[in-house]
Image: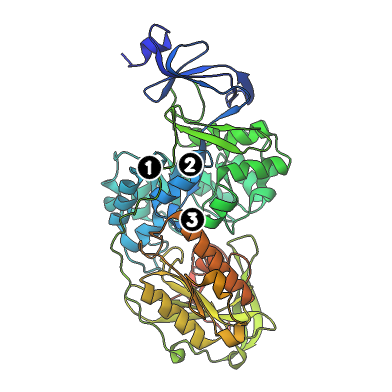
């Protein structure tokens, strides 16, 4: 007999009763002024009950715990427990996490690390196992995970499915190992930017049932009509919510949910998490009830999480209390019926991770040639790029008048050297930036105006054992404001160490936010665009159109091959 059955029948007191609040019911997208009782972390009943503790929520609105349908915790730059401290305060009680960032660096031990660290927090960090480590057969990172490697995680608590299958050509070609991975789980997330028509049909037929890579309404509508769940993404650089929101209405909201994918700690602290998605959706014209449905039950249903997403008998007592549905300011967060109290900072463990990079010399990144060059075009608010064809003389690079700069990717694992490409859109007028966060292989990536500064920036990342760095010459950059950045900067270097696999900081989240602000300000003084490190981190991602740069050189995503910088 379930332990709460007597309490549900009113034959014995519940652990707690919450009364007087307006409760959002996602089954009907409506509000109810009802009380609810909790026993052993689960809602046992709706109505009048007695409890050992009683909470008066009169005048407040109660919403089931918010769910992020797709996120890489590592992309916050925070260790899991610090990430949890931050998002719990924003009403999030469950995240569906894909640890493919740390898996690409550390392999299966990286997944073990994320699962173990997830037990240190009340936040439910539910894991979708990374399907593509490395992202493509051409990528060389820190590990290769086969179907046999993933199979040992089946049945482990917290593991619920297979994460974004980004090797679309492999799916369509019937790659045997990829098929074996997809056969491990009934729940499979997709990753198929721009895929359409018969190839989309085949991809869905193969088992991928959701997608978070839609950037246009037409793309999202086609995928939804073919049976996919559409995760509307709003990250630090992936701003898709405004464009995709017209997809959501009373009929389609059950097939739509919110995802942050990649959101740095500063955005989480400054703007919020899924609560930010709700606020923006309402501001863009969506009914608040539909937005709340997407943020709760829709995400739970997509992953077969029948124990959450609503406050109903037999479901987890995960919820947040807000002042007003329109403003959606979080007053309290409850997990399993207990108010979440910030435990404060606890130093995380950090996994051993390879960093064997050879810092290039200026001669190693020298470009030669002239003519039509492939230039990576940054797309503001997106992680896609454009394949720009520009007339270039390598002797004239950097070309700050046209904002064409050198992009360098240095192998962090085998010291095999550095690949060089060109990029438009970073805006730097002097100096360089570099980081060890470089999806998905996480080699060291840098963009800069001066070759010597690029080398120094890469060297700083190596010296830190992984991190983010801005490098400039004080006389050229006008000099940083040392009073603002003294504790994190020298006269011409600002840095954030990422001790955990070169991906996450071991620092408290508020200190990470402060250091990110110092990095951003230093880069801004050099002319950089906003969020330069998030754009930087995607320059080498070989599964997002159109072109990229890797440790080998320029990569054409459409052709799925390395290509020369100059010529066809």
| Within-10-Å neighbours for mark 2: few <14, some 14–19, many 20+ | many
Identify the disc placed on residue 317. none
Please name the residue that numbered disc 2 is placed on: 88
Give the Cα separation between the discs numbered 1 and 2: 10 Å
Q: Secondary structure at mark 2?
A: helix
Q: Nearer the viewer, residue 160 or 266?
A: 266
Identify the disc placed on residue 510. 3
What's the image's color scheme? rainbow
Q: Nearer the viewer, mark 3 or mark 1?
A: 3
Residue at image coords 37%, 50%: 179
Callout 1–callout 2 Cβ contact below 8 Å:
yes
Q: Position of residue 553 (x, y in %)?
A: 47, 78
Q: Nearer the viewer, residue 549 or 450?
A: 450
Callout 2–callout 3 Cβ contact below 8 Å:
no
Please name the residue that numbered disc 1 is placed on: 121
Q: Position of residue 258 (x, y in %)?
A: 57, 43
Q: Secondary structure at mark 1?
A: loop
């Amino acid at each position: 007999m379930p332990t709460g059955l007597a309490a549900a029948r009113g034959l014995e007191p519940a652990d707690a009763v919450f009364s007087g609040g307006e409760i959002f019911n996602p089954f009907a997208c409506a509000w109810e002024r009802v009380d609810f009782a909790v026993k052993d972390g689960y809602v046992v009943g709706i109505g009048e009950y007695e409890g050992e503790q009683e909470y008066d929520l009169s005048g407040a609105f109660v919403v089931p715990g918010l769910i992020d349908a797709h996120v890489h915790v590592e992309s916050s730059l925070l260790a899991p427990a610090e990430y949890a401290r931050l998002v719990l305060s924003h009403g999030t009680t469950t995240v569906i996490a894909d640890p493919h960032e740390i898996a690409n660096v550390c392999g299966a031990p990286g997944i073990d690390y994320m699962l173990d660290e997830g037990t240190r927090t009340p936040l439910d960090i539910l894991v979708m196992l990374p399907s593509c480590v490395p992202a493509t057969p051409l990528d060389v990172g820190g590990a290769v995970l086969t179907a046999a490697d993933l199979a040992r995680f089946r049945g482990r608590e917290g593991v619920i499915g297979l994460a974004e299958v980004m090797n679309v050509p492999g799916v369509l070609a019937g790659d045997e190992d990829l098929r074996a991975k997809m056969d491990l789980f009934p729940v499979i997330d997709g990753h198929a930017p721009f895929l359409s028509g018969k190839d989309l049909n085949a991809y869905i037929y193969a088992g991928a049932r959701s997608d978070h890579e839609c950037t246009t309404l037409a793309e999202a509508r086609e995928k939804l009509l073919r049976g996919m769940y559409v995760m509307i993404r709003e990250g630090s650089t992936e701003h898709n919510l405004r464009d995709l929101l017209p997809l959501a209405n009373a009929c389609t909201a059950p097939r739509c949910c919110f995802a942050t994918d990649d959101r740095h700690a500063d955005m989480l602290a400054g703007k919020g998490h899924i609560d930010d998605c709700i606020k923006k959706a309402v501001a863009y014209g969506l009914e608040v009830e539909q937005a709340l449905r997407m943020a709760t039950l829709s995400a739970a249903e997509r992953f077969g999480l029948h124990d959450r997403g609503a406050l109903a008998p037999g479901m987890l007592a995960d919820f947040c209390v807000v002042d007003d549905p329109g403003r959606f300011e979080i007053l309290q967060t409850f997990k399993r019926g207990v108010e979440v109290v910030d435990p404060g900072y606890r130093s995380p463990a950090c996994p051993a991770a390879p960093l064997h990079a050879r810092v290039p010399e200026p001669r190693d990144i020298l470009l030669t040639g002239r003519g039509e060059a492939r230039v990576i075009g940054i797309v503001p608010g997106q992680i896609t790029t454009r394949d720009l064809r520009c007339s270039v003389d390598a002797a004239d690079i950097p070309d700050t008048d046209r904002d064409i700069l050198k992009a360098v990717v240095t192998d962090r694992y085998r010291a095999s050297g550095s690949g060089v490409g060109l990029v438009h859109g970073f805006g730097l007028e002097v100096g360089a930036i570099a980081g060890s966060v470089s999806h998905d292989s996480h080699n060291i990536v840098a963009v800069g105006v001066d070759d010597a500064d690029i080398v120094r920036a890469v060297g700083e990342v190596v010296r830190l054992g992984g991190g983010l760095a801005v490098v400039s010459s004080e006389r050229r950059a006008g000099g940083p404001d040392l009073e603002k950045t003294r504790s994190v900067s020298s006269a011409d270097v600002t840095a954030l160490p990422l001790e955990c696999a070169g991906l996450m900081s071991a620092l408290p989240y508020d200190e990470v936010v402060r250091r990110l602000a110092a990095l951003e300000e230093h880069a801004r003084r050099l002319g950089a665009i906003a969020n330069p490190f998030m754009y930087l981190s995607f320059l080498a991602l070989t599964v997002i159109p159109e072109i990229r740069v890797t440790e080998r050189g320029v990569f054409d995503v459409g052709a799925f091959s390395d290509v020369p910088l100059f010529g066809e």
